[in-house]
């Protein structure tokens, strides 16, 4: 099993290109199910999750072109097998995003329940409730959702909590429904907006994406389109947090600064000098960061996907930071691993109190989920000596060429078997 070996203590310097956003690419790949015409994508990140989604769509009969240099073309001329089996879904819960498009396109779907994952139970009741409101008949048996609908009809759906993929699933389903759908308490994440922009370029009639109320007027069919996936705001934030921890000066290119304002603000509070101009972000950091406190929240609040990385930063902060996680019920597993590096963290329920220490000491640690792995990389980059991170397949799900990008910034990091 691959590991990452990091020799910490070196400041980062240079330039790094931000890849396309995993959490925009995944729903946008599913949008290909909504039309029989080709969907030509650009800036698709080379990630394990993207390969998994492409494989799932191909199993259904979607023609998926090879991914080269960020370009990928998909065409669902027909759908022979509207099924997402447990083997696939258990490795990537975002597979549930095929449910809405399949129901809209071919009126039936058999999708495994995703089951829990390391960071929480992560049910899909809002996805089901919304589709039922649109006229779908969905039964759950033996771990599968069996869904059918002659033709979905528009509905007013008030979601019980903000759910990103729930909003995306229902928005995609609504594009081909008869009548108008109103999604209330909708997620406002930039990835939802990117998906809406792609759907609109396919001919969908969507207003309000990016606000808490999205209005979709169903159309008879959608056309093909070309779409460039937005930059990954969490990858961007991860590199910014790494520089804030190690010190140095780095320029990030092909980024979207306006999609991670809460993260940038928090890093400025920690003492980083960050300037943004167009699609470039420059960060400069000298000395130890100041400890910061944060509470995660749906966009535009501080993103839960950046919580672990900021905890790593606080581990070497001057002072004490309090981190409160409000989105997922079990997203502090990185705290236990960070303690192995000498961090002083006390977890009480959904709050972690981090007393910054002068130096972390390198050690062998284990990745438990995607963003926890990123947090261990940030800590390893600043720890004294060697850090070995095991189970880095978690990282490969969501970070394109991480060790190459960091080595390009001067980090002593390598993948070892
Ligand atoms: C998306 O997951 C992201 N994944 C996650 O990123 C991200 O952490 C999360 O949104 C929150 O921003 C993708 O976009 C592929 P939710 P999602 O539905 O949609 C509860 C990463 O690291 N909920 O917004 O699955 C749920 O349990 C990943 O890239 C229900 O109770 O998250 C959670 O507590 C990790 N019922 C909260 O809502 C539902 O039907 C928010 O979940 C749906 C959600």
Image (tube, rainbow, N blue to C red):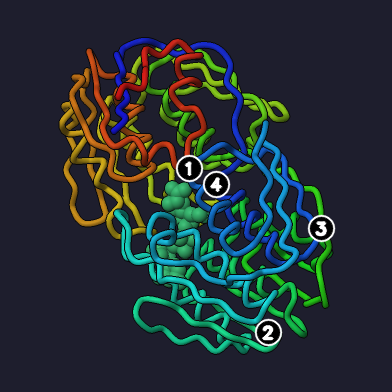
| Kind of element beneath mark 2 | loop
Along the polypeptide, which appears first: circle 4 or circle 2?
4
**Which label sits in the foreground, 2 or 3?**
3
Q: Quadrant of ligand 1?
A: bottom left
Q: Are marks 1 and 4 in contact (CB under 8 Å)?
A: yes
Residue 288 higher or lower than 139, as above or below: above
Residue 386 higher or lower than 170, as above or below: above
Q: Which residue is rendered at x = 70% and y = 74% of the image?
A: 105
Q: Which residue is rendered at x = 32% and y = 55% of the image?
A: 119
Circle 3 sits on which residue? 224
- Residue nearest the viewer, comparing 320 with 280: 280
Q: Which mark is residue 50?
A: 4
Residue at mark 2 to residue at mark 3: CA–CA distance: 21 Å
Along the polypeptide, which appears first: circle 2 or circle 1?
1
Residue 104 in percent (x, y) is at 68, 76
Mark 4 crowdedness (10 Å alpha carbons): few <14, some 14-19, many ≥20:
many
Q: Is residue 327 left or right of residue 388?
A: right
Q: Are marks 3 and 1 in contact (CB under 8 Å)?
A: no
Residue at mark 1 to residue at mark 4: CA–CA distance: 5 Å
Q: Which mark is residue 152?
A: 2
């Amino acid at each position: 099993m691959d590991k990452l070996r990091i020799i910490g203590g070196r400041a980062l310097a240079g330039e790094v290109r931000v890849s396309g956003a995993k959490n925009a690419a995944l729903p946008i790949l599913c949008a290909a199910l909504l039309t029989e015409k080709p969907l030509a994508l650009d800036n698709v990140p080379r990630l394990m999750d993207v390969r998994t989604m492409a494989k799932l769509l191909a199993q259904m009969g979607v023609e998926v072109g090879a991914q080269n240099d960020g370009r990928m073309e998909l065409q669902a001329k027909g759908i022979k097998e509207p099924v997402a089996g447990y083997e696939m879904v258990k490795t990537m819960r975002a597979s549930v995003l095929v449910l809405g498009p399949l129901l809209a396109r071919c009126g039936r779907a058999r999708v495994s329940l995703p089951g829990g994952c390391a960071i929480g139970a992560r049910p899909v009741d809002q996805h089901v409730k919304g589709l039922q409101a649109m006229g779908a008949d969905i039964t759950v048996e033996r771990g599968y959702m069996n869904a059918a609908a002659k033709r979905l009809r528009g509905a007013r759906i008030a979601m019980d909590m903000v759910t990103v993929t729930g909003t995306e699933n229902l928005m995609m389903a609504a594009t081909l429904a008869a009548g108008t759908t109103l999604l209330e308490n909708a997620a406002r994440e930039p990835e939802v907006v990117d998906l809406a922009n792609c759907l609109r370029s396919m001919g969908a009639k969507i207003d309000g994406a990016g606000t808490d109320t999205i209005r979709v007027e169903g159309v008879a069919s959608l056309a093909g389109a070309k779409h460039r996936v937005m930059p990954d705001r969490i990858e961007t934030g991860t590199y910014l947090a790494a520089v804030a921890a190690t010190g140095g000066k780095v320029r990030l290119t092909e980024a979207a600064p306006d999609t991670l304002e809460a993260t940038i603000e928090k890093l400025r509070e920690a003492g980083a000098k960050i300037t943004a101009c167009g699609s470039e972000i420059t960060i400069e950091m000298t000395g130890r960061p100041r400890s910061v406190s944060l509470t995660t929240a749906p966009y535009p609040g501080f993103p839960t996907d950046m919580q672990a990385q900021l905890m790593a930063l606080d581990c070497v902060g001057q002072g004490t930071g309090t981190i409160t996680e409000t989105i997922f019920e079990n997203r502090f597993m990185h705290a236990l691993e960070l303690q192995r590096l000498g961090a002083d963290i006390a977890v009480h329920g959904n709050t972690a109190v981090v007393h910054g220490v002068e130096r972390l000491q390198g050690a062998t640690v284990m990745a438990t989920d995607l963003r926890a792995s990123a947090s261990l990389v940030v800590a390893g980059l600043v720890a004294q000596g060697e850090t070995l991170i095991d189970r880095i397949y978690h990282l490969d799900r969501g970070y394109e060429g991480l060790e190459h990008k960091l080595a390009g910034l001067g980090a002593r990091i390598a993948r070892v078997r």
